[in-house]
Image (cartoon, helix red, strand yellow):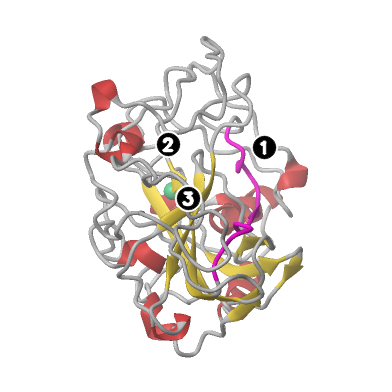
Amino acid sequence: MKYSTAAIVAALVPSAYGHYFWNRLIVNGVETGDNEFVRKTTRPTAYNPIKWKNVRDNSTPDLDDIRCNQGAFSSAASTKTKEVAPGDNVGFKLAVGATMQHPGPALAYLSKAPSTASTYRGDGEWVKIWETGVCDTSKDFTKDAWCTWDKDRVSFDLPKDLPNGEYLLRIEHIGLHGAHDGQSEFYPSCAQIKVVGGTDGGSLGSGIKLPGGYKQTDPSFNFSLWNGYKPYPMPGGPMYAGVQGGEGSGNDTAPAPTAAPTVSAPATTAAPTTLQTATQEPGNTAPTSTPAPPPSAQVPGTGAPAPAPAPAPVPNCPNAPRRKSKRSRKAKKAKKAQLN
Ligand SMILES: [Cu+2]
């Protein structure tokens, strides 16, 4: 049977710009292997998000799933731990050629393992070390205004004063297209790292617990992208403020991070911890017109226009209900190869 280009494109859509999961750690620009240092999820559909509503794979942010994705601890022992140095540029790449075609922020957290990363469940404090939100308020707030839009990776620097030891490094992208309806989508994963060449002792200061630090009622997860740009209140508590104590840190007097995480602030008075941009740009993102298709160069093998998301309500991802639909044999094979 001969497939039309359009049919093939439609079949490829889910893996090309649907849901996604992380499986590669990047260190100083060098990609590591699939799940070599990133714990593998056991969820039936690896790219499904974690959600509070319209739940997939029984996975919600109130479960341990929110740490490193569902079932990730079961692969901890078979996941390698990557040696890194303080200040190294690290990053994560999505699996199966996916890109982040969901609007929303990305965040990175560290949690110190009491002993080794490969035996750590992640039940300690998670300290946020990086975040990214809106890069250009003149663009579509439901799409490419967000810095991560259509990217297949993120990268950032580890703190220069990061104490020696083993950690879980947690990456997360949050899809906000359905957040006005309580349908924020969480895509976390963790890499196992060992910091060497730094100083001994000292702590990262206060962070959040996962689960617990994200609440279903948080303004960050009940936020509408659909009526033009507005500042987004970043979740995840205070940003890392420097090592607390420890030998040779020279930073023993660093102020303690603020005690009150913004995530627990009521919606009406929430003061965002971080605004990516200072100015408000009204009127340019009204979701009344059909969005332009993504540049085909950004979506390998397709020139497919993105399914136009309805302005409101937006209960589902454009592709979510279609993920089980016919997929080309080629894409299936490629995906299987990636997953093996
Ligand atoms: Cu989605």
Front one among 265 and 153:
265
Label 1 sits on what residue type? Pro
Disc 1 CB within 8 Å of nearest ligand 1 atom: no
Closest to the observer, 189 or 208: 208
User: Which one is closest to the eye, mark 1 or mark 2?
Assistant: 2
Q: Is mark 3 within 8 Å of ligand 1?
A: no
According to the image, label 2 marks what residue? 177
Vertical arrangement, residue 209 with respect to residue 336, above or below: above
Mark 1 or mark 3, which has the lower sequence index?
3
Q: Nearer the viewer, residue 71 or 302?
A: 71
Mark number displayed over residue 240: 3
Q: Residues within 10 Å of mark 3 (few under 14, many from 20)?
A: many
Q: Alpha-carbon neighbours of circle 1 within 10 Å: few (<14), some, or many (≥20)?
A: some
Closer to the chain start, of discs 2 and 3, is 2
User: Which mark is on residue 294?
Assistant: 1
Indicate the secondary structure of the residue bearing disc 1.
Answer: loop
**Total number of numbered labels?**
3
Residue 217 placement, left or right of 12: left
Q: Give the main secondary structure, helix, strand or loop, of the magenta stretch.
A: loop
Q: Is residue 176 left or right of residue 87?
A: left
Give yes or no for contact between labels 1 and 2 (Cβ–Cβ under 8 Å). no
Q: CA distance from mark 1 to mark 2?
A: 16 Å
Q: Quadrant of residue 76?
A: bottom left
User: Looking at the image, is mark 2 or mark 3 nearer the viewer?
Assistant: 3
The type of residue carrying mark 3 is Tyr
